[in-house]
Image (spheres, rainbow, N blue to C red):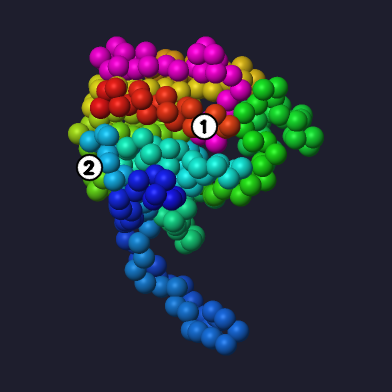
């Protein structure tokens, strides 16, 4: 990020949330950090796990009084907001340039937040997304066209850089949803009242955190959320407005047909609760070809500008 280009006055980072655990009964063993550094390693002791890492960028001339917190999707970390697979600036830079203080979150087990390498601390084994799964699930192309790398007609995702995108995949543990919501609340306490942008699985984590701490989430942008808070938690949401953004090819798989229906149902529940809830299905707005990773598609700057204007009109 170039401060001269994006007008960054300052940047930094912090950790938030998590808990301490004590490991005991494990054998001490001799290891080598390098070829010349043998060491007696004791794996027992006090450790901190389940924290979030937050990196922030404060513009020199803010246009929005509320910071914008960005939460990644499942099997990803905060880097998804920082750059595109073909080397362009990401949404982090785009929103800083629009005058938003931006806070990029690596939640529990992701990126620089780290994960718990101790057996039995988390009940399940991690899963990692393959290139084949990403190709079809993220709607880059049909499953049968993966080997040929033949994307959907009109596809805006830079499919020729799929290998670079797959490098961003990180392990995830399916048992940590509640923990992720708790840790997100801890991060939001450090950030203060804010606008919260989420992607995919991050939608469930974010909506649940927003229901627990309605004083901290004033507005939300949900990019193709795959999960939501529980129905009984909707009245607790403190956000005055929520924007849902969906790309193209939603009828390509039964999974996305189902997730879109559930998104509409959740949007309707927000409207019934008196929350402004706008639904952007981009093809209906004349914008075609966007994938699940629309912040990486070739029109990502245009979409960031539209979302930023929506936020600035309200906050």
Quadrant location of the C terminus in the rendered image: top left
Provide the secondary structure element on which disc 1 rests.
helix
Q: Which residues are magenta?
A: 268-296
Which of the numbered marks, if any, corresponds to residue 278?
Answer: none
Query: Given contact means CB atoms under 8 Å apart, are the residues at marks 2 and 1 in contact?
Result: no
Q: CA distance from mark 2 to mark 1?
A: 27 Å
Residue 5's place in the image compared with 242, above or below, is: below
Say left or right for 261 vs 204. Answer: right
Residue 254 spot, x, y in % from top left: 61, 20
Residue at figure coordinates x 70%, y 39% from the top left: 160
Query: In the picture, residue 271 is in which quadrant?
Result: top left
Whether 69 is among the magenta residues is no
Residue 42's place in the image compared with 313, above or below, is: below
Provide the secondary structure element on which disc 2 rests.
loop
Determine the residue located farthest toward the front in the rendered image.
4
Number of labels in the image equals 2
Say left or right for 25 vs 192. Answer: right
Residue 266's place in the image compared with 20, above or below, is: above
Q: Residues within 10 Å of mark 2 (few under 14, many from 20)?
A: some
Residue 265's place in the image compared with 216, above or below, is: above
Q: Which residue is mark 2?
A: 192
Residue 141 spot, x, y in % from top left: 69, 28
Residue 54 spot, x, y in % from top left: 35, 50
Residue at figure coordinates x 41%, y 55% from the top left: 113
Between 302 and 5, the residue placed more toward the observer is 5
Residue 182 at least partly seen: no
Which of the numbered marks, if any, corresponds to residue 300?
Answer: 1
Determine the residue located farthest toward the left in the rendered image.
215
Q: Nearer the viewer, mark 2 or mark 1?
A: 1
């Amino acid at each position: 990020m170039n401060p001269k280009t994006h007008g960054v006055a300052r940047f930094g980072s912090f950790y938030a949330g998590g808990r301490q655990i004590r490991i005991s009964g494990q054998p001490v063993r001799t290891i080598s950090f390098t070829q010349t550094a043998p060491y007696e390693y004791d794996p027992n002791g006090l450790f901190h796990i389940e924290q979030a890492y937050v990196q922030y960028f404060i513009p020199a001339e803010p246009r929005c009084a509320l910071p914008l917190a960005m939460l990644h999707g499942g099997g990803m970390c905060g880097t998804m907001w920082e750059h595109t697979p073909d080397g362009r600036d990401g949404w982090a830079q785009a929103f800083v340039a629009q005058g938003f203080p931006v806070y990029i979150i690596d939640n529990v087990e992701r990126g620089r937040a780290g994960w718990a390498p101790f057996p039995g601390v988390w009940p399940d084994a991690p899963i990692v997304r393959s290139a084949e799964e990403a190709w079809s699930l993220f709607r880059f192309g049909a499953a049968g066209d993966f080997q040929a790398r033949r994307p959907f007609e009109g596809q805006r995702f830079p499919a020729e850089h799929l290998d670079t995108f797959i490098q961003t995949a990180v392990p995830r543990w399916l048992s940590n949803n509640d923990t992720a919501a708790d840790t997100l609340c801890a991060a939001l306490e450090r950030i203060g009242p804010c606008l919260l942008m989420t992607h995919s699985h991050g939608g469930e984590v974010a909506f649940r955190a927003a229901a627990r701490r309605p004083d901290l989430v004033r507005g939300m942008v949900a990019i193709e959320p795959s999960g939501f808070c529980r129905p009984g938690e909707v009245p607790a949401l403190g956000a005055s407005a929520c924007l849902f953004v969906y790309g193209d090819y939603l009828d390509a798989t039964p999974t996305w047909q189902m997730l879109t229906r559930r998104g509409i149902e959740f949007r309707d529940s927000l409207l019934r609760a008196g929350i402004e809830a706008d639904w952007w299905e981009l093809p209906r707005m004349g914008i075609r070809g966007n994938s699940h990773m629309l912040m990486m598609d070739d029109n990502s700057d245009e979409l960031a500008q539209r979302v930023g204007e929506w936020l600035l009109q309200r906050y």
